[in-house]
Image (spheres, rainbow, N blue to C red):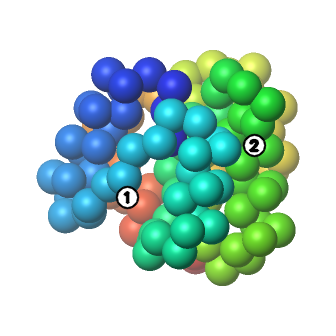
Amino acid sequence: MDDSAEVAEVTSSLFEQLGYATIYRDSAEEALSLLADGAKIDFVFSDIVMPGAIDGVGLAREIRSRYPNLPVVLTTGYSDAAQAAPSELRILRKPFDTDTLQDFVQNIGK
């Protein structure tokens, strides 16, 4: 999930290079609706800074409440946003490349 379609496209491309299929949503509300509709999702990857009522941290909290076994990875290019996020959340700092993304994703759930 990212509010920038261009950034989401690049990130999706990186995930696809690693063999993942992606589903893009541009708001937390849309992502939660997708999950509520029963979509099979292995993990959620979201920017922290998002417009609207629910940012990436809020999305992670909602997902943990509703779907406790669904991993959530957050990303940001803003150091203030990363520092303000709860320490239990996994945060991948932007910019990142395919190797960094692969290493990070392989450690989800560990």
Q: Nearer the viewer, residue 62 or 106?
A: 62
- The numbered mark at residue 103 is 1
Mark 1 secondary-structure assignment: helix
Looking at the image, the residue that sits furthest to the front is: 37
Q: Identity of the amino acid at label 2?
A: Val
Q: Earlier in the sequence, mark 1 or mark 2?
A: 2
At 26% from the left and 62% from the top, the residue drawn is 20
Residue 110 in the image: x percent, y percent? 58, 76
At 28% from the left and 33% from the top, the residue drawn is 9
Q: Nearer the viewer, mark 1 or mark 2?
A: 2
Residue 25 in the image: x percent, y percent? 47, 42
The residue indicated by pointer 2 is 57
Mark 2 secondary-structure assignment: helix
The quadrant where residue 82 appears: top right
Residue 21 appears in the rendering: yes
The quadrant where residue 83 appears: top right
At 57% from the left and 30% from the top, the residue drawn is 76
